[in-house]
């Protein structure tokens, strides 16, 4: 089952006070599509819920077999139903909603049930409410942003929709509609993603550090072997001879740990400076400056 269906089922399970039932119906009807209004879902329980919210024998549900399962189409039996709930109006009828948080939240709940989707994917989060015409979309945009929640407008062809890709915005909208558990799930998924991302970043950083250490050590070993072969230990300053032997005996050790083995101990930068001197000698041997 998709996350969208989980959200819709949670919304369908929420209580609806009698005085807000018409607001919920208005939201649902606002999300219907087509010249002859209809709403299609793959979830039988959601289709049944929408039918039951409206007065008895107002809507019907018809099922159709499709390649991937069964599709349920909810449509009015009586044209007076979409007329009553303002379906054929392009503008939002604010009087049908009211202005309180509970009223606006109930309207958005109905709207999401019939025209909403929310996805949680590896690429991120996506919340969407399909509004059909540009006029309807702009009306909804104003209503939602008045509540302090941020959405954007976009379109596919001539069909306009509202959307958000921000997990906190999506969580706020779901909570406002009444899908509290789904909102919490969004935040839990975000936390898990951030933890995994931090772990991966740490592992990648550590791997990169190891790779750099290995490459640096290999270069140091090549330089040391060349210098000792060409000059011998006797011609090397004692401090360079000491660090060369320490590296030969400990090819995988970090500069800091090599410094702790020196007598007396030296800092990481001190060890690095000595290897730079050895590297310079090796380069001079390679280009013939020292024979």
Image: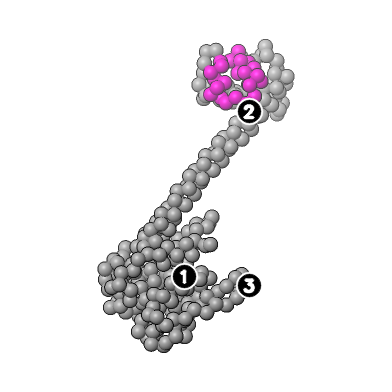
- Decide whether residue 127 is among the magenta residues: no
Query: Which residue in the structure is indicated by mark 3?
Result: 67
Is 47 in front, or is 124? 47
Q: Is residue 173 visible?
A: no
164 up-or-down from 190: above or below? below
Query: Which residue in the structure is indicated by mark 1?
Result: 46
75 relative to 20 in the view: left or right: right
- At x 53%, y 62%, the residue is 1
Query: Which residue in the structure is indicated by mark 2?
Result: 217
- Decide whether residue 248 is among the magenta residues: yes
The answer to whether marks 3 and 2 mark residues whose Cβ atoms lie closer than 8 Å is no
* Residue 134, numbered circle: none
Q: Residues within 10 Å of mark 2 (few under 14, many from 20)?
A: many
224 up-or-down from 199: above or below? above
**Is most of the magenta stretch helix, strand or loop?**
helix
Residue 115 x %, y %: 45, 72
124 relative to 279 in the view: left or right: left
């Amino acid at each position: 089952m998709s996350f969208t269906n989980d959200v819709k089922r949670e919304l369908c399970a929420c209580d609806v006070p009698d005085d807000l039932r018409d607001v919920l119906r208005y939201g649902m009807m606002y999300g219907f599509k087509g010249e002859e209004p209809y709403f299609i879902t793959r979830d039988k329980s959601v289709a049944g819920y929408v039918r039951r919210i409206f007065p008895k024998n107002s809507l019907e549900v018809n099922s159709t077999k499709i390649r991937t399962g069964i599709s349920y189409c909810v449509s009015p039996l009586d044209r007076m139903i979409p007329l009553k709930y303002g379906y054929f109006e392009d503008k939002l009828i604010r009087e049908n909603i009211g202005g309180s948080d509970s009223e606006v939240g109930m309207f958005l709940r109905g709207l999401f049930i019939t025209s909403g989707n929310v996805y949680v994917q590896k690429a991120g989060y996506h919340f969407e409410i399909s509004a059909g015409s540009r006029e309807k979309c702009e009306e909804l945009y104003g209503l939602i942003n008045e509540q302090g929640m941020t959405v954007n407008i976009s379109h596919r062809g001539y069909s306009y929709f509202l959307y958000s890709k921000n997990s906190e915005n999506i969580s706020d909208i779901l909570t406002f509609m009444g899908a509290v558990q789904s909102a919490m799930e969004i935040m839990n998924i975000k936390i898990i993603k951030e933890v995994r991302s931090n772990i991966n970043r740490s592992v990648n950083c550590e791997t990169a550090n190891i790779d750099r250490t290995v490459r640096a050590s290999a270069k140091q070993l090549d330089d040391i072997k060349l210098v000792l072969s060409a000059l011998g230990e006797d011609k090397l300053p004692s401090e360079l001879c000491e660090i060369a032997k320490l590296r030969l005996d400990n090819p995988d050790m970090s500069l800091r740990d090599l410094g702790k083995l020196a007598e007396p101990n030296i800092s990481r930068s001190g060890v690095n400076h000595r290897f730079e001197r050895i590297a310079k000698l090796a380069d001079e041997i390679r280009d013939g400056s020292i024979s």
